[in-house]
Image (cartoon, helix red, strand yellow):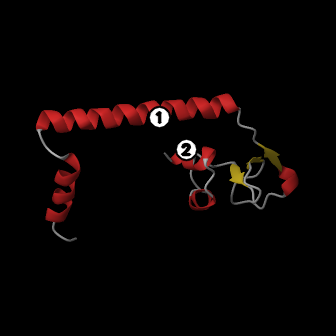
């Protein structure tokens, strides 16, 4: 989901909090909402002339969204199957398990 928030939705707060991460190293989100490849690393003060607009092909974004959609559907289907096989409400069971944990 991190890639989705960064590269598809382009959440500024995610870019800010992850600017030292490996999946954003060498890139930045501009004030215009566009992603730029930076010649300098994030800790350097790169000027606008040191940036290159990153144009993500629509097929790449659509492909990533298709993979994400299929993965989530499979995961949710498996959770429902697990609940059925175990005859339990997984959400309630996990919530109760969290409540039963001693405070740290």
Q: Residue at x 77, y 56 (%)?
A: 32
Residue drawn at point x = 75 percent, y = 48 percent:
36
At label 2, counting other C-alpha atoms closer than 10 Å, the crowd grade (few under 14, some 14-19, many 20 or more) is: few
> How busy is the neighbourhood of tag 1: few (under 14 within 10 Å), some, or many (20 plus)?
few
- The disc, 2 or 1, on the residue closer to the chain's N-terminal end is 2
Q: Quadrant of residue 85?
A: top left
Q: Which mark is residue 10?
A: none
Residue position marked by numbered label 1 in the rendering: 69
Q: Which residue is mark 2?
A: 3
Residue at the limit of the structure toward the bottom, as seen here: 103
Tell me if label 2 and label 1 are in contact, CB under 8 Å.
no
Label 2 element class: helix
Residue 8 rendering spot, x and y as whole percentages: 61, 44
In the structure shown, which secondary structural element does the residue marked by tag 1 occupy?
helix
Calculate the distance from the C-alpha at mark 2 to the C-alpha at mark 1. 14 Å
Furthest-right residue in this view:
49
Q: Residue at x 84, y 58 (%)?
A: 47
- Left or right: residue 29 compared with residue 15: right
> In x, y percent, where is residue 33?
72, 54
Q: Nearer the viewer, residue 2 or 38?
A: 2
Identified at 55% across, 35% down, the residue is 65
Relative height, residue 40 to residue 88 (above, below): below
Q: Nearer the viewer, residue 103 or 4?
A: 4
Residue 3 image offset from top left, x and y in percent: 55, 44
Q: Quadrant of the C terminus?
A: bottom left
Of 65 and 56, nearer the camera is 65
Q: Quadrant of residue 61?
A: top right
């Amino acid at each position: 989901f991190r890639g989705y928030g960064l590269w598809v939705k382009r959440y500024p707060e995610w870019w800010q909090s992850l600017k030292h991460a490996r999946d954003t190293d060498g890139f930045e989100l501009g004030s215009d909402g566009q992603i730029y490849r930076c010649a300098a690393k994030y800790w350097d003060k790169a000027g606008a002339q040191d940036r290159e607009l990153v144009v993500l092909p629509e097929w790449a974004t659509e492909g990533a969204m298709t993979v994400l959609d299929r993965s989530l559907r499979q995961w949710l289907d498996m959770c429902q199957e697990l609940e059925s096989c175990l005859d339990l409400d997984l959400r309630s069971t996990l919530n109760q398990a969290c409540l039963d944990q001693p405070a740290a």
